[in-house]
Image (cartoon, helix red, strand yellow):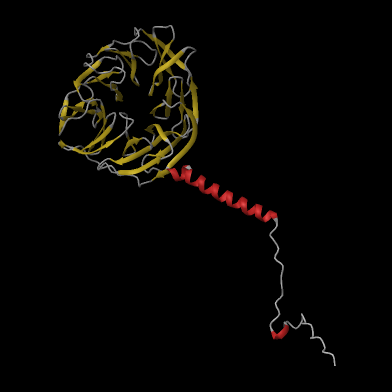
Amino acid sequence: MKDLPSPRPSLRSGRAPEGRPFQRVTRLRRPPLRIWVWTAVTLVVAAVAVVLWRTSDVVATSTTTAAAPTVPDAAPADELAPAWTASTTDGPRRVVEGGRVLVTDEHGVAMLDAGTGTEAWHYRRSNATLCDATAVDGVVIAVFRTTGRCNEAVALTATTGERDWYRNVRFRTDVDLASTTQILLAASPTGIVTIDPTGNNTRWRYAPATGCRFVGADVGSSGVVVLQRCEGSTPLQVQLLDGFGGTVIWTRDLDTEGRTARLAGVGRLVDVVVGDTVHVIDPDDGTLREPLPLPALAAGDDVRSEPLQQAEVGDVTLLWARGTAWALDQETGRPRWSVPATGLPALGEDDTVVVPEDGALVRRSVADGSERDRSAAAGTLPAGGRTALLGPVVVYATSDQVLGLR
């Protein structure tokens, strides 16, 4: 009998020959091309996102906040000594705002506790350079450069460090910021612009005449003053502009004979220092008042960078230059009194000012300069500083440092 062929395995039985389990052979299929494309795109997007994150402003910005400070209701002690000192890059100027003390560095700003000098809050950007900063109306305004221009501005609440507003700007790298109540001034040789410090909107712009450049600008209670020099013209032009509208109120020519001219300040008097003379100008109509002679500069001092300070207290204008503090009557422009001083006095209580003098901080009458009392100060205060009071602390700001005495 012929051998019968072995029965063929049945797919239904699920058994292979010789009793082994049957295994279905499945042919593998490659994913469609679109899947590979989508996967590649996803990986690229993820890599780009990581790079952008690492180089973004978010990562490069270091910011802290703090609770609002409480300033003790106390006067400076009879004897004062330096309690702390901090470096800064944009002094001297009014550095006290919101009960704190402003200092700046290459990449940002910080507000210090007045009593201890410790940092209360800061705002710094490692990918940007600080162009300038100022403090007014409860905010600190800082302008940064991330491109070829100073192109970003931010306002931070002075007490807490919280961001108030941010905007893009297009300022030159040599921009100088100044401020007074409700006005932020950004000035450069080719133009000025004013901004609302608490609302961030641009109010107006003003450029020098053709062939002219601004060599100085400042803002105060009377408006914005610019110093303008023009090619082929000897006189220096002084112009006062309305702080909110930008219209020219008056123009005054000063014969400087080519000498350096600098604004000491703007308020109920406009003071321009030319050589060894302070030209005192009435802000109402540009009338020149009686000039104020200054001591000659010491050998080696540069008139282009000498400290000049000015502020308003009551009905007088305080002016500091070359080792002397003057109280100028705002009606006549004439000195009511003057005393040797290391820097600009601060507003005190009961119609007084606190004058930084050699070895002491002296409280004097605004009216006649008579001494009321004094606090002995250990050490020598550097020349050209600006004084402010925060309760029992005396804050003294110079061009490169801020000191706290208590």
Q: Is residue 172 left or right of residue 100?
A: right
Residue 172 falls left or right of residue 86: right
**Can the viewer see residue 270 in this picture?**
no
Whether residue 45 appears in this view of the structure is yes
Q: Quadrant of residue 342?
A: top left
- Quarter holding the C terminus is top left
Residue 96: x, y in percent?
Answer: 31, 35
Residue 154 horizontal/vertical position (percent): 44, 36
Q: Position of residue 275 (x, y in %)?
A: 29, 12
Q: Relative to 80, is 5 above or below?
A: below
Q: Quadrant of residue 223?
A: top left
Residue 337 in picture, x, y percent from top left: 21, 19
In this orientation, which residue lies closer to the viewer: 7 or 355? 7
Q: Report the front residue among 288 and 86.
A: 86
Furthest-bottom residue in view? 1
Q: Quadrant of the N terminus?
A: bottom right
Q: Is 298 above or below relative to 14?
A: above
Which residue ends up furthest to the front in the rendered image?
1
Numbered circles on residues, count: 0
Relative to 250, does residue 401 appear above or below in the rendering? below
The residue that appears at 16% across and 28% down in the rendered structure is 372
Q: Within the image, what quadrant is residue 27 found in?
A: bottom right
